[in-house]
Amino acid sequence: MPDEEENEPTFFVDAMLGNIANKLRLMGYDSRYLADIEDDELITLAKIDNRIIISRDKDLIRKALKYDIKSIFIKNKEEIEQFREIINKSNLKIIKIDGHRARCPKCNSKTKLINKKNIQKKIPDRVLDFNDKFWQCKNCDQIFWEGTHIKNLQKFVGQLNER
Ligand SMILES: [Zn+2]
């Protein structure tokens, strides 16, 4: 629902934390991530879009605070604990993997449900046989389905919700 999404926080994830960006995107949270970016540029871009910075770099966090940008310093090394920090500090309400909400893990764009019949030539037969729902990124055209990757992520999300 668009209204719901408008009130959700958006993020700028620091280069060292690509795995977090990836998961946040699949959970439907708008998360910008650039593998190669200078701190100053990251801060400028986060400020323009009003994004919360997520980082393990103390210097970056310090700078962000100076510019009055909300940021989350990731202390923990364990991914599940890192996510708990993010959820608590940014007050995330929806912690689930839902194809309709998920953003493209590659480029952060929204995805759309597509008819299996239209992608038969692009997807291996085995995948077509075992999956019914497919989504396509509206920007980079990448196709997604609920494969093992998503199933593992569901487990991760289940652990996050066990509190
Ligand atoms: Zn994409």
Image: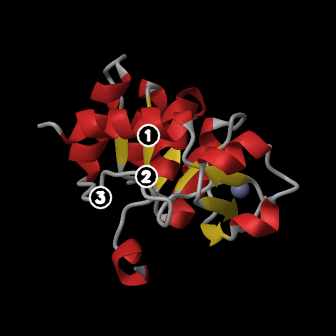
Name the amino acid type tagged 3.
Ile
Q: Residue at x 48, y 41 (%)?
A: 23
Q: Is residue 47 left or right of residue 92?
A: right
Mark 1–mark 2 Cα distance, whole angstroms, equals 16 Å
Residue marked by disc 2 = 27
3 or 1: tag closer to the N-terminus: 1
Tag 3 residue: 94
First in sequence: mark 1 or mark 2? 2
Circle 1 is placed at which residue position?
Answer: 54
Ligand 1, by image quadrant, is bottom right
State the quadrant of the N terminus: bottom left
- Secondary structure at badge 2 equals loop
Against 146, residue 5 (above or below) is: below
The residue lying toward the viewer, choosing from 101 and 35, is 101
For ligand 1, tell me if the residue under mark 1 lies within 8 Å. Answer: no
Q: Nearer the viewer, residue 158 or 56?
A: 158
Q: Secondary structure at mark 1?
A: strand
Quadrant for residue 79, please give it.
Answer: top left
How dense is the environment of label 1, judged by Cα within 10 Å: few (below 14), some, or many (20 and up)? many
